[in-house]
Image: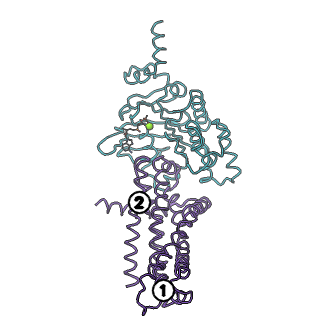
Amino acid sequence: MIEVKNIRKGFGDVEVLKGFSTTFKPGQTNLIIGQSGSGKTVFLKTMLGLHKPDSGQIIYNGNAYSDLNEEQQRDLREQIGMVFQGSALFDSMTVEENIAFPLKMFTKMKKKERIARANEVIQRVNLENANHKLPSEISGGMQKRVAIARAIVNNPKYLFCDEPNSGLDPNTATVIDNLIREITIEYDITTIINTHDMNSVMEIGDHIVYLQKGHLAWEGTRHEIFKTDNKDVTNFVYSSNLFKMVREAQNAK
Amino acid sequence: MSYLHSIGAYFIMIKDTFVKPTKGRVLSDLIFKEIDDLIIGSLGIVAFISFFVGGVVAIQTALNLNNPLIPKSLIGFAARQSVILEFAPTFISIIMAGKVGSFITSSIGTMRVTEQIDALEVMGINSLNYLIFPKIVAMLVYPFVIAIAMFLGIIGAYTAAVYGGFTSNDAFLSGLQEDFIPFQLFYAFFKTFLFAFLLATIPSYHGYFMRGGALEVGKASTTSFVWTSVAIILVNFIVTQLLLS
Ligand SMILES: Nc1ncnc2c1ncn2[C@@H]1O[C@H](COP(=O)(O)OP(=O)(O)OP(=O)(O)O)[C@@H](O)[C@H]1O
Ligand SMILES: [Mg+2]
């Protein structure tokens, strides 16, 4: 469980996160949605400790991140998997080495076991036949899947994904969404996903946080999001033509 | 003020490079990779430059020896002194600031802008230790490069002087052995060690703390070359003052 208490973060004069609180529970997929530039990435990175908050607290299972010493912070981070918006694969390593990297760093597994485990997750993210390629030799969508595989290979307790399915075709995007949801439930992970994909919201939005210009403007479930009368949220939801058509069809009935 | 700030940040970086070390097995792989990239990959250019600059030093000395009272053995002596004291340790290190330095800055800088460093940090890895410590260790081998440069520089001088017809084999060799002071060799390798440390750390600093995108990576490499060279020249001056005068 991750509790966010009145978090604020700015760069220079610009305040990006303007003080809000929420709680992310394990075993469900928590979604952060909002327009481009609303502060989703900054919010994730602040929770991860990559940005130091100006005020407020991030509490991991009862322990405030800022109260942990450096050693404890690093121990905590070994339990975190993160999928960066730009994948952030190590470009000097092959796909297989990238995925096995957390195992090499943090487990006592032998090389054979590491490769076996890496190939398990490679299958789960549908990424066969790329094991010995370098990140520069595979497509953006494949890089995304490598990043997801690397994030989940060491069974993290917390999983952060910054737009895990942007740049993927709708089919693969759905597969990835469901995969993340499955392992979240299976291993009781606290999962937080940044997205502006309404399909993901429909598919896996157990708990949705809507950010607007650094404020938490709304939160609820995927069922509630279609019933809210918050204008900004409805604008965001129905900015997709598909949903607009569905709504018009319903209104016509 | 901002220079002071940078120098402070540089020393803090060095301190943090030594905390929370990466797992031994991983670290040794990284060190061998760095030795390959930084040291082995530089041998060719170092050998080439050393040989020919050694030759030029010999020819210049020979051409300036018009006074019949000065013995021809001076050519060997001058070649030895200039190659061992300055040319191999300092001049080659400036070349390395361009070759190895810009390689380090651009590779670490690229990792910064593509969030690979964030990825390491998120996993709980001390990215400074992971990235910079292996480079520092690999550069401990650097004095061997300089030893090779000294050797080839003198071979180059010999070749140019003897086969170029400026002096005889015997005269060159006797000049080479004239007034040899072992302490000067210590001085040369002592400063080489310091240069090795600068070559590993200053370019790392410029890569690690850069901001921006691909364009800034290029700029950072240039800045890194300038500051590494300046630092080498200054340290060279200080060490020479302290040890030789
Ligand atoms: N390191 C930084 N320094 C200064 N400003 C930053 C920094 N990182 C982000 N910002 C600013 O914070 C704001 C929010 O950025 P953020 O990347 O969180 O948006 P986002 O919601 O993730 O958008 P997108 O959906 O496009 O990824 C932007 O205005 C951005 O310019
Ligand atoms: Mg973002």
Image coords of residue A169 (percent x, y): 56, 29
Q: Residue furthest top?
A: A253
Give the SS element for disc 2: helix
The purple one among the chains is B
Residue A127 in the figure: left or right of residue A88 = right
Q: Which colour assignment does the render follow?
A: by chain
For mark 1, name the chain: B
Q: Which color was chain A given?
A: cyan
Give amino acid for label 2: Ser
Packing grade of label 2 (10 A; few <14, some 14-19, many >=20) is: many
Of badges 1 and 2, the one in the foreground is 1
- Ligand 2 quarter of the rendering: top left
Say which label, 1 or 2, has the lower sequence index.
1
Say which of B155 and A206 sits in front.
B155
Image coords of residue B55 (percent x, y): 50, 76
Residue labelled with disc 1: B77
Say which of A159 and B37 sits in front.
B37
Image coords of residue B215 (percent x, y): 41, 48
Give the SS element for disc 1: helix
Say which of B143 and A98 sits in front.
B143
Query: For residue B129, which numbered disc appears in the image?
Result: none
Residue labelled with disc 2: B224
Q: Residue furthest bottom?
A: B69
Mark 1–mark 2 distance (CA, rounded to whole Å): 36 Å
Residue A168 lies in quadrant? top right
Give amino acid for label 1: Phe
Residue A39 lies in quadrant? top left
